[in-house]
Image (cartoon, helix red, strand yellow):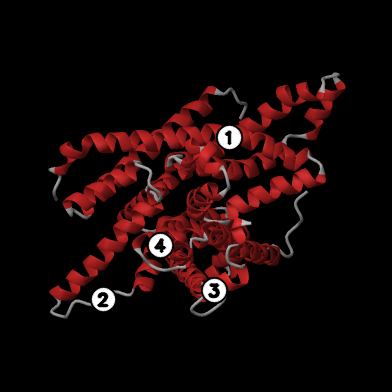
Amino acid sequence: MILAAAPLSELLSFGDKGYGDEMFWGALRSVQIAFFAYAFGLCLGLAGAMGKLSGGRVLKAILEGYTTLVRAVPELVLILLLYYAGTDGLNSLIVALGFQRIEINGLVAAIFVLGFVQGAYHTEVLRAAIQAVPIGQSEAAKAYGMSPFLRFRRITLSAMLPNAIPGLANLWLNVTKDSALISVVGFTELALATRQAAGVSKQYLVLYLVAQAVYLCISFASGQFFNWMERHVRRGQPKLA
Amino acid sequence: MHWSWLPEYFPIIAHGLYVTLFILVFSVVVGFILAVPIGLIQVTGSAPARWIAGAFCGYIRGTPLLTQLWLLYYGLGSTFPLIPGFREHFMWLVRLDAFYYALLAFTLSFAGYEAEIMRGAFLSVPRGELEAARAFGMSPWKVNSRIWFPRAVLQVLPTLTGEVIGQLKSTPLVFTIPVLDLMSAISQVRQDTYIIYEPLIFLAIIYMILTYFITRAFGYLEKLIPQRR
């Protein structure tokens, strides 16, 4: 059989002969990018949702522009634009301040770019989830004399999480898959590591299938985690149907 | 800002736009036609058929479209010529353009995402309506074509806007395999002229305009359908 020109165990072995180590490190980087980009996006999204719900008119307009723009342009185009513009802009700022140009770490740039894109989606998910919480709950907390922070932590956050978890789960699955787009700017994560390994070994079919199996495992495991998470935040709520 | 390149490269960009739109429309239409039976199988099929349809959706939704595209183009594309006798008999297939792989990958992807949505839509049609149709003596096919399909498809329509926009935003991925779409046209401009940002900004604006028109078109389509609110 043509597919078995090189045995899978040898092809995926660690060391000089196989590509197991390259793909392993690639997968690890993919997860790393996804995780930190997600965390960064979540922070941006939380700030963005707060701004959209209770900010001034100028802030609201800026945030509206951010979410509309980012969600209307393909992720790939945004990544190219922000990757080059971001690293360039930072460097010219550094030079203007009188320091030496620096080599910006590809991993950090990738995380910031993907996180910035994720932030727009997080903003919308969280805004909708917070808006779905009955205003009376927050007012009651205010009447009890809770400080804004305590009110957010005890009432708004715990009441909006059941609404937000499905959307947040979707965004996590998206970011794990979008991390493959970073390969376009030449950063070696799982997709690019696989492409390079396949290019050398000519075992395109097998190696791509292996890479997809890894992505599938990540998706499946995350799906299980978010299911558990949703059950957890919905505890005590009446069952639907 | 340099925009002097625009007139010179306009024909390439226009052709790229055409390719992008063709991939979008083809994959959405054919993908949707595939999605309906896949969704239905997941609801009514036998256990093995249900498992296969579910696995297909899980695979499509669980792996990046970029790697699906590469698997088809590089994986299958490099495997076909290795089959003995393939070169002699299927020369036309060996010369298959990357464009066809792109069409295949995007159609399957849209079918996978949409089938999952169709599954939910089929499930959410009230059982009483189906039972009433059967009580009227409708054949299973008539129940499907008069009650189940129309009701399910109408429910999916509002989500279709977002799905189509998502599909549009995936189309630039085809530039990673040699397909001359809008994105490849723009990267050609960037490589020829060494202008980094302006072509990308131009590209972003085109996608935003396309998104706007898709939103408007589907909004119009939704209004056409009589609905009691």
| Residue at image point 73% right, 42% down | B42
Residue B174 as seen in the image, left or right of residue A80: right
Asked if the residue under mark 4 is in contact with the one under mark 3, i.e. CB atoms within 8 Å, the reply is: no
Camera-side residue of B13 and B127 = B13
Mark sitting earlier along the chain (3/4): 3
Image mark for residue A20 = 3
Q: Which residue is mark 1?
A: B32
Mark sitting earlier along the chain (2/3): 3
Residue B20 as seen in the image, left or right of residue A207: left
Local secondary structure at mark 2: loop
Q: Is residue B163 visible?
A: no
In the figure, residue A20 lies in which quadrant? bottom right
Q: CA distance from mark 4 to mark 1?
A: 29 Å
Q: Which residue is mark 4?
A: A182
Asked if the residue under mark 1 is in contact with the one under mark 2, i.e. CB atoms within 8 Å, the reply is: no
Q: Position of residue A10 (x, y in %)?
A: 58, 73
Quarter of the picture holding the N terminus of chain A: bottom right
